[in-house]
Amino acid sequence: FLFGAFLCGILIDKNQVHFGGKSFYGLALVGNSVLLIIATFQESPLLAGCITATACGLQNAMCTSHFGAVVRTTHVTGTATDIGSTLGRITMIFLRNGCRRSSMNVLDSAEVGVDA
C-alpha cells in the first residue's frame, strides 16, 4: 500500500493534477488499472494481495492529490497514504535536482523542509 502511495508521489506533483500537462495523472490511472489486471491473473494469493494493495495505495494517493488532501477514500490508511506520497514527492525533488540539496531552488527547498 505504501509503495503505491510512493509511486503517486513520484508521478503527481503536490496538490496538482494537470490532464495532459506536467503531471502524469493519466499514467498513474492507467498504471492502477494494469496493476489490478495483473493481480487478477496471479496464482499466488500473497502476490495478488500485494499487487492489489499497491493499486489501492496508488488510487488513494491519486484521490488525495486530486482533491487537495481534503477527501480520503479510507480512514484507516490516511497516514500511510500521506507518508508514501510525501516520500515520493521528496524523492522526485531530489531526483530532479541531481540528488543534491544545494542545487534546489527556493520552492523545492521549502517543500522538502515542510514535508520532512
Image (cartoon, rainbow, N blue to C red):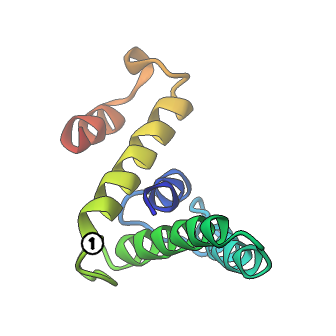
Residue 41 rendering spot, x and y as whole percentages? 80, 79
Along the viewing direction, whichever of 62 and 20 lies nearer the viewer: 62
Q: In this view, does 65 lie to the left or right of 6?
A: left
Residue type pointed to by label 1: Ala
> What residue occupies the far left of the structure in this picture?
114
Residue 110 rendering spot, x and y as whole percentages? 24, 37
Identify the residue shown where x is 43% and y is 57%: 2
Which of the 4 quarters of the picture holds residue 67?
bottom left
Identify the residue shown where x is 23% and y is 80%: 75
Q: Disc 1 designates what residue?
A: 69
Above-or-below relation of 72 to 82? below
Tally of numbered tags? 1
Residue 80 rendering spot, x and y as whole percentages? 31, 60
Q: Is mark 1 on a helix, strand or loop?
A: loop
Q: Is residue 87 left or right of residue 68?
A: right
Residue 65 rendering spot, x and y as whole percentages? 39, 70
**Badge 1: how crowded within 10 Å, few (<14), some, or many (20+)?**
some
Q: Quick one: quadrant of the C terminus? A: top left
Identify the residue shown where x is 22% and y is 35%: 113
Identify the residue shown where x is 56% and y is 62%: 23
Q: In this view, does 36 lie to the left or right of 4?
A: right
